[in-house]
Image (cartoon, rainbow, N blue to C red):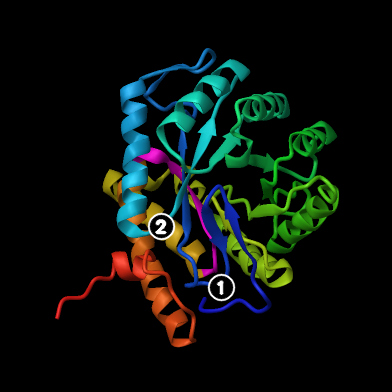
Amino acid sequence: MFGIRGEQKTFEVGGVKIGGQPGENPTVLIGSIFYRGQKIVKDETDGTFDRKQAEDLINRQDQLAEETGNPCMIDVVGVSEEALRKYLDFVSAHTDVPILLDGGTSANNIAGLQYANESGLIERIVYNSLVPECKQAEIDKIKEVGLRSAVLLALNSRDFTARGRVTAIDDLLKRIDGAGIEKPLLDTCVLDMPTLGQACQAIVELKSKYGLPAGCGAHNAVSTWKTLKPKFGGKAVEPCTASADILAIAAGADFILYGPIGTADYVFPAVGMVNAAFAQIAMERGVKIDKTHPRFRVAQFRG
């Protein structure tokens, strides 16, 4: 995909640019930390974790973002209010990148928003996520604390097609009208391998319709592929995951929720390579590419 019809919006969220035409701005990569089953988490309810390992993972994502030119955000997952508070404190102290608040339930996220507001972090927070059936209390809290960015998840339980995903976003944009969410990020909802194609089609349709930044959690196509390792072995996981991310970028994705932050080492170089290639096409169209773009940090040529 070398162009999306219609004017495309670019937002700045916590100092990170996101959106635009393919090739114009680097893909924003979002790794998840403290998710269920992550080995660094010792007790997911009270939020006990290995602080050294967590710091190393955060620093590595930041380092790869600097080396490739792909900006990053961090998806902070927590199953309890107490855990979320501890995680937010830790992550905000160890990186300056935007933080996705991912409490899993409306109650956790509402409490997380309140804590982020009290802690002075609200400008760095992205709500993850709102669905068409979300509780009005979530929207009300977002408005109360002045949050300006949220992930809108195109989950349509009645219609799993690409068109159903577009309808879900249509409904969500109406629901949040007046809530102050000036910078919505559209997640086209990958549940498994077949839905990856539908999510990619929805990226094209939604960016064409609204011009808003769109992306997805493409890694879900691989993490739910139960026969991958038995059939093809463990070595197949990394290239398949990178390929899923690249497919979404080829469809025009502005951001990728790439899954566990520990997989950053192979995700960033793969995405940076494709961004560098797409940027060349954009440059030939007359687009000015920033010197921090992967086109100049990844694609370095020797005379």
Rendered image quadrant of residue 138: top right
Residue at 70% in and 59% down: 161
**Disc 2: which residue:** 70
Segment colored magenta: 251-262
Query: Residue 194 at what x, y percent from top left?
Result: 56, 56
Residue at 36% in and 62% down: 272
> SS class of the residue under badge 1?
loop
The total of numbered circles placed on residues is 2
Residue type, mark 2 in image: Asn
Rendered image quadrant of residue 39: top left
**Disc 1: which residue:** 21
**Pick the front one: 125 or 275:** 125
Residue at 52% in and 51% down: 15
Residue 95 to residue 298: above or below: above
Q: Residues within 10 Å of mark 1 (few under 14, many from 20)?
A: many
Q: Which residue lies furthest to the left in this view?
A: 303
From where the camera sits, is residue 270 visible?
yes
Residue type, mark 1 in image: Gln
155 sits left or right of 229 in the view: right
Does the magenta-highlighted stretch encompass residue 22? no
Q: Residue furthest front?
A: 120
Does the magenta-highlighted stretch encompass residue 255? yes
Q: How crowded is mark 2: few (under 14 residues within 10 Å), some or many (20 or more)?
A: many
Query: Residue 84 at what x, y percent from top left?
Result: 57, 23
Residue 274 to residue 222: above or below: below
Residue at 32% in and 69% down: 296
Query: Residue 65 at what x, y percent from top left?
Result: 37, 52
